[in-house]
Amino acid sequence: MKQWKDALIQGKKRVAMPIMTHPGIELTGKRVIDAVKNGELHYLAIKALADSFPTAASTIIMDLTVEAEAFGCKIIFGEHEVPAVSDRLVSDFDSVANLKIPNIQSGRVSEYLKASRLAAENIHDRPVLGGCIGPFSLAGRLFDMTEIMTAAFIEPETITLLLEKCTQFLISYAIEMKKTGINGIIMAEPAAGLLDESMCDQFSSVYVKRVVEAVQDDQFLFILHNCGNTGHLTQSMINTGAFGLHFGNKIDIIQVLKEVPPEILVMGNLDPVSVFKMATTKEMNLLTNQLLAATEEYPNFVLSSGCDTPPGVPVDNIIVFFETIEKFNKNKLLKNSLTY
Amino acid sequence: MENILEKIAYCVEFGKINKVSPYPPDMKGQDGADELTKLALEQGIPPVEILNKGFVLGMDRIGKKFSENKVFVPQMLMSAKAMSTGMQHLKPFFTSGEVVRKGKFIIGTVAGDLHDIGKNLVAMMVEGSGWEVIDLGVDVKSEKFIEHILSTKASAVALSALLTTTMVNMEKIVKDIRDQAPDVKICVGGAPVNLDFCLKIGADHYSPDPQGVVEYLNKLVA
Ligand code: B12
């Protein structure tokens, strides 16, 4: 994967990798609830997307409930919606101390591993990237997202213990994902985006770094996604050692590209909802072109959505997105050949 | 007397809940909003003074810093926690009628949306400015908003949405509320919402942050 990353950076073409699986579910005629509960249907959705669009890599569903469910959280499933956690699981030091680190086959984890394995076995023309939640966001799901923000100050020992348990689980999960034969993972750590820089270092990045170190190597790429970062946390994200960083639509991506070392991939950041889902094809074309033009001089940039694209994205918008990039690449090639 | 009220405001601004709380580190071991509110009441300071010159002032200061991006969500939540801990001591005076709050304010995140951190911040800021807050939680449908507006006779209701897809649900909720409770003032907010959208769906107020809601509500009762 180091080769893949380096080739992307050295290559003349701009490529795109939206975090996108829902349109695949729709292509296979299934519902969200089918894919998030069944690894095989999930894989078929990933495959359908790979067969339809020239994505730089295939991604699995950004489902931020799988790990929390493994720990014991109750999950609400909607037929056509991304699942959600219904209630907090722990609330104080004792409940955290009693919390068991789940087995790697708990809940739907085994279905997600199955989807990864099938994708790795059957998709050969591009890398397959698995996915998981980040340690602070997982801890927030277990402890309640609002409560964890203050508990980090008032009872840091409770939150540290919880983060330790979340991290141990995520390390095992990442190792298991790697064994399925996939080429890397995208870790989603949105809640850390609400912290200031020193808190993000202390309560997220040091833990993320441990997961990175457990799996990342020349064959396996680690991408950290933080859509909450508005610009104040880029250095903290770099500190994790991940070779790929993925940003949300709230950030000034040019500023990011100036800050991130050129050997690290920077990915982002068209709004998954107001652009991918709700824009007209004309707007989609315009906004994609704007992003392409603005980022042209940065070889380590990969076009992407700012977060997971939700259910209900019009296929036409995805087609236009990729067509716009292709046209941009052709024009660039032409321009280059004319200057020689 | 000024001194203890200023101390309460300071504790709220910097999130010092009580003596045992280790936050903020430079106030370790000192009394917090909890102890100081109790002490102020023992000294005979009228509860309404504690509310206005302690809590409201402290929340107003942190709210401004938050609007200016000088502090982040956790710091803001610490202030809210300090405020609500102190507020517990004032609750008996609210029930007895000795302290009259400015009005009743209902808030919820709209149907389909489970983001609640921003909504919680708005709720806490409004409570800190002297209103009684009824928080309906997340994924709230029209019927639930209407039921509570009618049963509590609230003067204002706030809808929060963080997803562009659930923001559109606001239009229906605003219309439903108007049909059943035409007098209640409706505020809308959340990251994807803006003033144009607010006007388009016929809501009464939009602001990008909680401070704006507080100012709007205060004008209503001025
Ligand atoms: C934390 C977070 C989560 C947490 C939520 C935890 C919780 N209990 O709230 C989790 C991980 C669960 C989550 C889930 C999802 N999320 Co989310 N999430 C975020 C994140 C990182 C921060 C949101 C936040 O809390 N901000 C902090 C608060 C303080 O800000 P705020 O809510 O805007 O509130 C302020 C103002 O707007 C205002 N305000 C708020 N309400 C009101 C009301 C009134 C009346 C007024 C006047 C003002 C007001 O005051 C507040 C203080 O200033 C954002 C990205 C970002 N940077 O914003 C994405 C984001 C909101 N999420 C997004 C998405 C897509 C999702 C998911 C669909 C992802 C998925 N695939 O599962 C799910 C949806 C779940 C659901 N059905 O709701 C997208 C939405 C895109 C869009 N335009 O619609 C965002 C923007 C990320 C992105 N870049 O794409 N998310």
Image (spheres, rainbow, N blue to C red):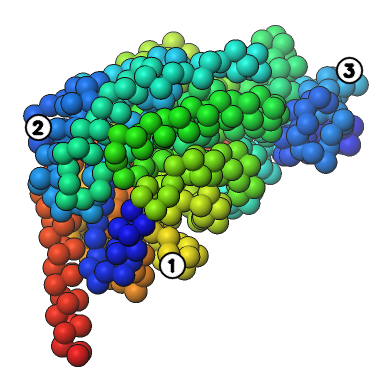
- Say which residue appears at 87% left-offset and 30% top-offset: B29
Quadrant of res A183: top left
- Pointers 1 and 3 within a single chain: no
| Residue B205 against residue A268 in the figure, above or below | above
Disc sitting over residue A262 in the figure: 1
Circle 1 Cα neighbour tier, 10 Å, few/some/many (<14 / 14–19 / ≥20): some
Whole-percent x and y of residue A296? Answer: 31, 71
Q: Is residue B158 left or right of residue A219?
A: right
Q: CA distance from mark 1 to mark 3?
A: 63 Å
- Judging by the rendered image, the residue that carries numbered circle 3 is B42
Mark 2 vs ligand 1: CB below 8 Å: no
Circle 3 Cα neighbour tier, 10 Å, few/some/many (<14 / 14–19 / ≥20): few
Whole-percent x and y of residue A238? Answer: 51, 55
All told, the count of numbered labels is 3
- Say which residue appears at 43% left-offset and 64% top-offset: A263
Disc sitting over residue A275 in the figure: none
Quadrant of res B35: top right
